[in-house]
Image (tube, grey):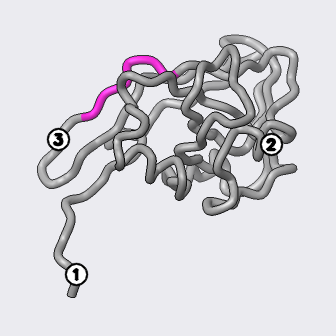
Amino acid sequence: MAVGPFLSHDVGFNEQIRGDVDFLASGVAAVLVTTTHTPDRAADTQYSHISTNESADVDYSAQALGTKTIAVEATRVRFNCGKITFTASGDVTGRYLYLVYGTAASLVAGDRILGHIDLTGGGNASSINAEFSFTPHANGLFEITRTAAPA
C-alpha cells in the first residue's frame, strides 16, 4: 500500500486561503470513505457529496483532528495534526481520508471539504479487531510553498 499525498479540493481550499474558515480555530473532521466513491476535487465540495460512501462499519466514526498546527518551515507553510485513530481495536474499512470543516460528531450536508488522502492507492484498507489510524507524514498533512510571480 502506498499512501498518496493530500489533494486539496477547490472550494474548501479556496475558503481556507481567503480566510473564510480557520484550520486552527474551526472544527476539522477526518472522514473515511470507501472505494465506492471516486474523488472529484472540483465537484466534491461538501460533506453531502461523500456521505453516502462513508464507512458504515459499527466501529467507525468520524474523528475530530487534534493537535492542529500551522508553522513556517523554511519557504513553506505547513499544516499538520496529531495521529487520527478511527478505532483502537475494531473492524473499520476505508480507502480515502477526507478532511471536512465541521464537528465530527454532527457533520451536516453543507460542511466544506478541504481535501483528501488516498490511503492505499487501490482498494480499501481494513482493520479486523485492530487499530485503524492515520499518522501524518513528518512534513505534515500538506504544505503551501512560497509563491512566485507569473512568467
Query: Where does label 3 land, which residue?
Result: 72
Q: Nearer the viewer, mark 2 or mark 3?
A: 3
Residue 39 image point, x, y percent = 71, 56
* Front-most of residues 150 and 8: 150
In this view, the residue farthest toward the left is 74
Q: Earlier in the sequence, mark 2 or mark 3?
A: 2
* Front-most of residues 126 and 62: 62
Residue 139 as seen in the image, left or right of residue 8: left
Is residue 91 depicted above or below 141 in this figure? above
The residue segment tinted magenta is 65-70
Residue 150 shows which numbered tag?
A: 1
Residue 59 image point, x, y percent = 80, 15
Point out the image quarter for the C terminus.
Answer: bottom left
Q: Element at badge 1?
A: loop
Residue 71 as seen in the image, left or right of residue 46: left
Q: Is residue 69 magenta?
A: yes
Q: Which quadrant of the view contains residue 131?
A: top right
How would you classify the magenta stretch by its main secondary structure?
A: loop
Query: Where does label 2 land, which residue?
Result: 34
Is residue 68 depicted above or below 141 in this figure? above
Q: Earlier in the sequence, mark 1 or mark 3?
A: 3
* Front-most of residues 135 and 46: 46
Q: Nearer the viewer, mark 2 or mark 1?
A: 1
